[in-house]
Amino acid sequence: MTESIIQKRNGCEPEYGNWIPVKLVGILLSLTIVAFIIFILTMLYSESNLLKALTTLLFLVITFFFGYMTYVRRAFSFKHGGLMGKVHQYVLDCLAWDGKGKLLDVGCGSGALTIRCAKAFTEAECTGIDYWGALWDYDQKMCVRNAEIKGVSDRCSFRKGDASRLEFGDETFDAVVSNFVYHEVRNNPNKEALIRETLRVLKKGGAFALHDLFSNKHIYKDFNGIVERLKADGISKIYFVANTEKTIPLPQLMRMPGMLTGLGILYGKK
C-alpha cells in the first residue's frame, strides 16, 4: 500500500497551500465584481462611447487576470495540477549532493521542498526558513505538521527568517536550495546580494540549486554577469540554465509573453 493511500485513509494528507495565495485570487475576484458593476452601470446610464469603451476594457482586463490566476493556482496545486511538485523535483534533480549533512531551504513556504529533500536524502538534516508574510497561505505550524504527516519531523526543522540576513554562520550547511523566492524579497532590491547571502552559509564544496526568475531582465538585469562574478569569486562549479519554463516544462498558457516566463536555475558546487 502506497504512502499516499495510507495518508488518505487516515484522513491526514499534507496541506502545502499554493504559490498563488488565495487572498490574491480573492482580491482579483472582488475587483472583477466591482468592474462588472461599473460596466453594467456605464452601459445603462452613460451616453459617452469613450467611457463605455474604457469600462469595457477595464472589465475585460481584470476578468482575464482573475481567470488566469485561478488557472495558475489550480495548475500549481499539489492536490490538482501538481505542477509545483514537478518544479520542486526539477530543483532537486539539479542538486548534486550525497545527502550527508545539513541542508537549508531558503523560503520554504509550506515546507514542501524541504520535506521532499528530507524524503530524498534519508540521512540529511533539513532546515527551512521563511518570513511567512501575511499575504501567503503558509505558516510555521503548517510546515511542522506536514513534516509529521510525511514522517520526517525528526530530521526537519522550520524557523522564521529573512533571506537577506540569514541567521546562520558562514559555511553552516552542506547543501542549499531555494525556489521562487528571491524576486519576492522586498527589503533588498539587490538580488545578487540575496544569492550571495545564501551561498555564504554553504560550506566550501557544498551543493546548491537555486531557482527563480533569473532570466527576467527587469528583475535581474544581466544575470550572466552575476554568474561570471560568482565564478571569479571562487565558486568551483556553477551552471545556469535559462528559461526553465521550457525545460520543466510549464504549460504553454503560462509561457505567454509577460506571464510566467524568465525562469532560470543556478546550480553547482561552492
Image (cartoon, rainbow, N blue to C red):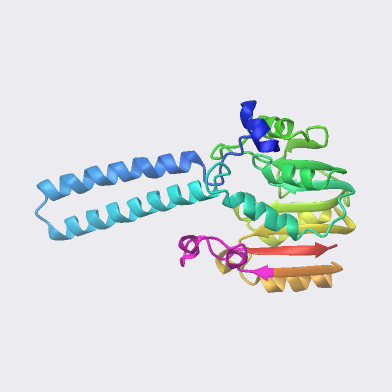
For this rendering, which residue is in front, 256 or 250?
A: 250
Residue 44: x percent and y percent? 11, 46
For this rendering, which residue is in front, 49 or 86?
A: 86
Magenta residues (range): 241-263
Q: Above or below — where is 13 with respect to 24?
A: above
Name the residue rendered at 37%, 42% in the picture: 29
Q: Quadrant of the C terminus?
A: bottom right
Residue 244 placement, left or right of 36: right
Q: Identify the image quadrant of residue 56.
A: bottom left
Q: Above or below — where is 252 with respect to 158?
A: below
Residue 107: x percent and y percent? 68, 46
Residue 54: x percent and y percent? 23, 58
Q: Is residue 244 magenta?
A: yes
Residue 193 placement, left or right of 47: right
Q: Above or below — where is 46 with respect to 10?
A: below
Residue 150 placement, left or right of 74: right
